[in-house]
Image: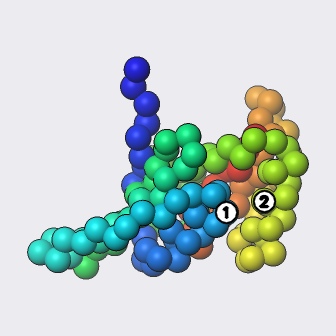
């Protein structure tokens, strides 16, 4: 049966992004992969259910940057399930104390989700849900 293996994000600061996701969501930060000929480096952060996020940097390409938290076509947020409403609340408060901007919630949405939405260090939307 198909499953999503990973999502990849271009980032400015590979180490900071891996540390943020590893700490906030109990992810395991993998080893650094580099390809000097292509000006490429990446690291995966793996989560308990098998899902992974690949964080990538480049010195040869010029990925288009979006304003922090912007709504745009294509990937608009990552949803991270943390297991309970209490964990959503606690993690949201913890990330706010660490400086992560809160965009919404915690709240129950019209379709029944309990969630909050914060920004990671590079302005990507993270939906924290049960």
**Depth check, front residue: 6 or 50:** 50
Q: Which residue is mark 2?
A: 91
Task: Report how many numbered discs are placed on residues in the image.
Answer: 2
* Residue 68 visible from this viewpoint: no
Q: Which mark is residue 24?
A: 1
Where's residue 48, x and y in %? 57, 46
Tag 1, which secondary structure? helix
Q: Judge whether residue 80 can be spotted in this image.
A: yes
Give percent across and percent down for residue 16: 52, 77
Looking at the rendered structure, the secondary structure element under dot 2 is helix
* Residue 129 in the figure: left or right of residue 13: right
Q: Position of residue 39 (x, y in %)?
A: 20, 76
Choose the circle earlier in sequence order: 1 or 2: 1
Residue 22's place in the image compared with 126, above or below, is below
At 81% from the left edge and 75% from the top edge, which residue is drawn?
A: 97
Up/down of 90 relative to 51, above or below: below
């Amino acid at each position: 049966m198909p499953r999503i293996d990973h999502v990849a994000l271009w980032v400015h600061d590979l180490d900071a992004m891996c540390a943020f996701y590893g700490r906030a969501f109990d992810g395991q930060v993998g080893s650094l992969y580099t390809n000097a000929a292509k000006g490429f480096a990446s690291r995966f952060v793996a989560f308990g259910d098998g899902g992974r996020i690949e964080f990538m940097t480049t010195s040869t390409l010029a990925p288009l940057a979006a304003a922090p938290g912007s709504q745009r076509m294509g990937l608009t947020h990552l949803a991270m399930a943390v297991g309970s409403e209490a964990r959503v609340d606690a993690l949201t408060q913890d990330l706010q104390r660490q400086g992560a901007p809160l965009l919404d919630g915690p709240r129950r949405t019209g379709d029944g989700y309990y969630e909050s939405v914060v920004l990671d260090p590079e302005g990507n939307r993270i939906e924290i849900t049960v």
